[in-house]
Image (cartoon, rainbow, N blue to C red):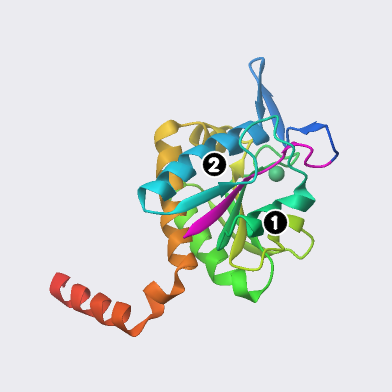
Amino acid sequence: MRIAIDPGHGMSNRQPGLYDPGATHVEAGFRFEEAEIALRYAFVLREALRARGGAVFLTREDAGDHAPVAERVANAKLAGARALVSLHLNTVEDERANGVEVLYRGEASRPLAQALQGAVSAAAKLRDRGIKERDDLAVLRFPGPAALVELGFLGNDADRAVLLNPARRQAICEAIAETLLAAAIPARAAGPLGARRGATRRSRGA
Ligand SMILES: [Zn+2]
């Protein structure tokens, strides 16, 4: 079961040959970049998926990879990915804005978006801003369950502290991995055998 992880932004994302850092925020002389933080999340998520028996395709692996946004979905398809998650950080002028939101395109991806929204906001212990349908994002034109997770707001002090915390990053990535694998293997959750097993386990545990 191969899952595509798209660390948002990076080299050639918007313009060939140009590095797109995504959102940036300067605090005490240090410049935080969305592209770099998203990549760190992608590496931890890759390990969390592999630990659960999943295979992973990354749309980019470093800050130098030529990865135009228009080609990321095509590359994920070629790699045989069954589901796709794009990792981003939000930004707005208002530094009070905070929380997690998940973007999706089309009804088929709505259940994954909803599941990720709940799992990520719970693991991050950040505000649940809900899911939003977006038809204009190239990276969501994937022929399988796909969602773009805005992990939090880079410009918000509380969100940024959570996003940069390694333990919290691990917990968030574990939650994303569980959710993605459940979505990519619908038969496991919905099949009659799976349902019977689930019922037995529940009654024993009660
Ligand atoms: Zn972004």
Q: In the image, which residues are magenta?
A: 1-14
Residue at 20%, 73% in the rendered image = 201
Front one among 38 and 52: 52
Residue 33 location, quadrant: top right
Cβ at disc 2 under 8 Å from ligand 1: no
Q: Which residue is mark 2?
A: 42
Front one among 201 and 144: 144
Residue 182 in picture, x, y percent from top left: 43, 65
Q: Around disc 1, counting alpha carbons within 10 Å, would you say few (fewer than 14), some (14 to 19), or many (20 or more)?
A: many
Find ligand 1 in the image and state its quadrant. Answer: top right
* 7 is within the stretch colored magenta: yes
Badge 2 amino acid: Ala
Residue at 56%, 61% in the rendered image = 83
Residue 36 location, quadrant: top right
Q: Is residue 99 left or right of residue 182?
A: right
Residue at 79%, 38% in the rendered image = 12
Furthest residue to the bottom?
192
